[in-house]
Amino acid sequence: MSSDLTVPETGPADAAPTLSAVAKRAGVSSITVSRVVRTPDLVAPETRARVEQAMRELGYVPNLVAGALASARTNSVGVLVPTIANSIFADTVQGLSDKLEPLGFSVILAQSRYDAAREDRMLAALLSRRPEAIVMVGSPATEEGARLLRNARIPIVETWDLPATPIDAVAGFDNYKAGMAVAKHLVAQGRRQLAFIGGDDPRATRRWLGFREVILASGLAEPRRLILERNATGSVVAHARLPDVEAVFAANDAHAIGFMAGLRNAGLLREGPASAQPVAVIGLGDLEMGRLISPALSTISVHGDAIGRTAAALTLERSGERRVDLGFELVLRDSG
Amino acid sequence: MSSDLTVPETGPADAAPTLSAVAKRAGVSSITVSRVVRTPDLVAPETRARVEQAMRELGYVPNLVAGALASARTNSVGVLVPTIANSIFADTVQGLSDKLEPLGFSVILAQSRYDAAREDRMLAALLSRRPEAIVMVGSPATEEGARLLRNARIPIVETWDLPATPIDAVAGFDNYKAGMAVAKHLVAQGRRQLAFIGGDDPRATRRWLGFREVILASGLAEPRRLILERNATGSVVAHARLPDVEAVFAANDAHAIGFMAGLRNAGLLREGPASAQPVAVIGLGDLEMGRLISPALSTISVHGDAIGRTAAALTLERSGERRVDLGFELVLRDSG
DNA sequence: TGTCGGTATGTTAGCGCTAACATCATGGCT
DNA sequence: AGCCATGATGTTAGCGCTAACATACCGACA
């Protein structure tokens, strides 16, 4: 059957075989091959078998680039995160892609590195690949980025926050309320000198504002805010810059754990429960590590993977509720 | 100048503007617009200005899908990792994309979830988007996957290991030697009852084999191996299944930290140096957290981001050395 | 004055596929 | 016998862009 024709496994097939190469070999038209690939039910079993045989012999791999151009459907979604390494956003990307990959969608990943200009460039780069939706952490940092997204006329899902006027859809939680919840808890514990440490991205800032709001409303002194590098190692020495601090809310668990390392060095960390801690520490993210260290880290648990799954759903379904609040939980352990 | 034509910001541009729409508006041919986008130096300044004006007015976003089909260059690379959440592979993806994104390449991300069938599906899905290279963690689990990659005739970079017969290029380190290095260290410390805990993926298994090899060569008893779930929480209780164990090599830092939590619960963890630990623990990955906890985690430090950057280089440059050993370091701290 | 090299722009064809619409049997029904 | 629904397959055009090859124009030069 496969007499003198070159089989890719054994000889160099110079160019990738196309639909019509398969069609010729199977003695059908190319549309029939296309149907075998996309809608096999519409093809008679014998024809289908013949075409599948030809595809196997030639090692045919469909060209989705051409298919996308012809059908105006790329079956891809663009995902923009600040950073993927050591980051809780990886959970969201995982949740998203777990839902989307089985449906034949691919994830095009881009990182903004917390840089507005790079974010705009990445947004433009993503859009030029004509994804069927864009999922991003946060909201566009510039009006230019927002304009690009609005003009794209595809589902846009902003995540990890609940912007007042989203471009299209939202899956996240209220960072302001998270800050408030932490402050309420610490104030109720009787802590008076409070501080916030971490980055100064929009979401961290909203946590800070909620945190501060409650503290001022409680009649306590203005809390301090320390802007730190994005790696946790820097927060090890943060304690030196916060004399007399009684409680710290860290913008994420990594910073919290770094800060705790600093406290340990200063002899201010106890093995006992929160009430025994000279300085209470609360993180955000609920890293698995936080549960395993001692004292176990108290934290705001957010649902990174649920955010990703919800974003996927918002991407696929354009009607219905476009604003999903996944909430958060204050998980109290031994650090504060 | 922009008399009665619809501007996207103000009215609904039903379809995305195309090159020829821009061309018509600027009074040039579409190839000139294409040149303004791709090779502006070849266009006279006044013409260029006119075209750029038209692009701005229409909100033109180039369609790379069409461009890719016409030029047979997609400017994309496929990346396949077992998982991206909570994983050291995220460093590699970050390193890769940091090098590639500025060059106009996009990263198409797929996860195999340590599942051979899913890996094959993802490989086929990636390939059908005609990436200009594939970077994957490890090597294809099936012959089918390997065949797909070989037939693709694009650079293929296998990472995080040093396979004997790679498909094309490799950027990684020797997992077997890493296991050996840990065993040598623990044996020299005088530890006799050794165990390995973690996953059973090919890389972990190579670590185990190197570990075991040295132990047997030293005349010690056969070490035990515990296959654990991929989350660290399971390793908290692993200690109960390893009575009398004196040292543990964990396939990754998360498992190591989980195991240490179990030791702490059992009263077998000291604040002192390695020599004071009843049970030594060594991890792999050098998570930032490992340095911050107490006792600080001893670990094999690998260069996840360098693997990504090297993979990017191997992707762009097809000649030269195709096998890069990024090495590893045994970092001794207080846990073992 | 004719020609030549360089610069700027245009024309043509086609990348590999799919949407939309034929076409053509087949067979059950009235 | 004629009709038409149904199923299987084919034809045609075109998605939005780029490669490769024209073409036109300009001034310099012998």
Image (cartoon, coloured by chain):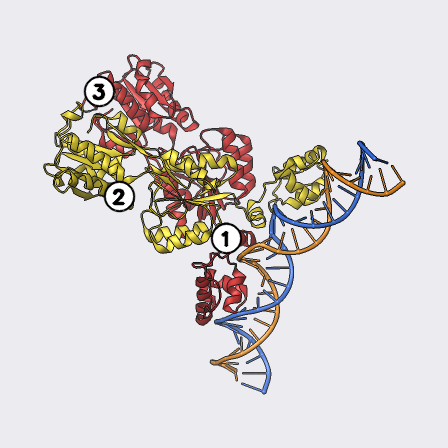
Chain colours: A red, B yellow, C orange, D blue
Residue B43: where, in percent of width, then height? 69, 37
How far apart are labels 3 and 2 at the CA level? 39 Å
Q: Is residue A80 visible?
A: no
Q: Nearer the viewer, residue B323 or A218?
A: B323
Q: Chain of mark 3?
A: A
Camera-near label (1 vs 2) is 2
Q: Chain of mark 1?
A: A
Give the numbered dot on residue B206. Answer: 2
Residue lying at 56% horizontally and 44% vertically, measured from the top left: B64
Residue A103: where, in percent of width, then height? 41, 52
SS at badge 1: helix
Residue where numbered disc 1 is placed: A64
Which of marks 1 and 3 precedes in the sequence? 1
Answer whether labels 3 and 2 touch (C-beta < 8 Å).
no
Camera-near label (3 vs 2) is 2
Above/below status of C2 relative to A230: below
State the quadrant of the C terminus of chain A.
top left
Q: Number of labelled discs?
A: 3
